Amino acid sequence: MNLTLKTYLNSFRFKEIFGEILLIDLIYFGIITTLFSITLNFFQNKFSVLTGGKTPEQVQQLLASATPEQLLPFLSQLKFYLILFLIVITLLSLIAFFSYSFSQSMIWHKLLAKKPFRHWRWNLLNLALIIPILLYTLAALILKFITGYLFKKIATLNPAFYLQNSGYLDAILTLLNGMVTFLLVLLGLIIILLAYFSFTEKNLVWVSIGDSFHLLKEHWNKIWKLL
């Protein structure tokens, strides 16, 4: 059997470390999801009580017909809850970001059997990754637009045939565009994981990001098969 394929299939074998990593992820996503759900439900209930259960259209009509004196208490409470909502969501987002960096640090040090070193530096890595992620996303969108245009052009080379089989051809176009999107997203995730791998080894932010693209190029003959 091809060594790359064999290695890929062997990666599905259950190991003890898999359970530990899964537990870390479950704890992280479980806690963060619960916190956001509780917060959103709390403010949803507060806004519902504040508006008396009215729909947005009914609230708009009420605001249009009420006098300034009648509106003042309502607007004051609304302003208070909106500001409080923004503050709480911002704090939760920061907690989610910092705890995500910490969980990834734990996972990658376990994977590579490395002694944990300066967990806080993973925050710097994830912040720095925003720039290449945005650039990659822009390049991916351009590539997706080009491939979508080419697929459409090929499908409509014969207009009469396309009109007769538009249902089937549109389904094929949707499938092809979906495959391109899936592969681009997966490739982006691989670049991020390679950056995490390099950072665990070297503990250098920008070097690790650059190294991820170097590793991608170096091992492309294996990676494209996995893709």
Image (cartoon, grey):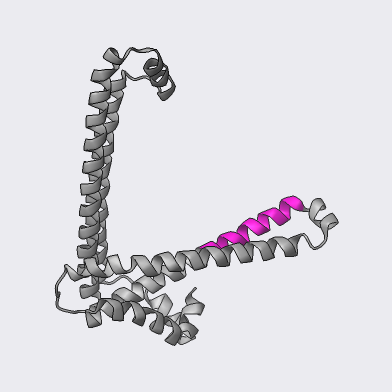
Q: Is residue 208 visible?
A: yes
Instruction: Say if 100 sits above or below 222 in the image.
Output: above
Q: Which residues are magenta?
A: 166-181
Instruction: Say if 154 sits above or below 82 in the image.
Output: below
Snapshot quadrant of residue 128: bottom left
Snapshot quadrant of residue 215: bottom left
Viewer-proximal residue among 20 and 99: 99
Q: As drawn, which residue projects farthest toward the front? A: 68
| In the displayed structure image, the side of residue 35 where residue 146 appears, left or right | right
Q: Is residue 12 visible?
A: no
Residue sitting at 62 percent across and 66 percent down?
146
Q: Magenta stretch containing residue 167, yes or no?
A: yes
Task: Give how far across and how far down residue 224 sits, in percent.
Answer: 50, 78
Task: Give how far across and how far down residue 17 sits, in percent.
Answer: 24, 71
Instruction: Say if 50 sits above or below 118 in the image.
Output: above
Count of picture labels: 0
Residue sitting at 29 percent across and 77 percent down?
206
Residue sitting at 38 percent across and 15 percent down?
62
Task: Give how far across and how far down residue 56 sits, in percent.
Answer: 41, 24
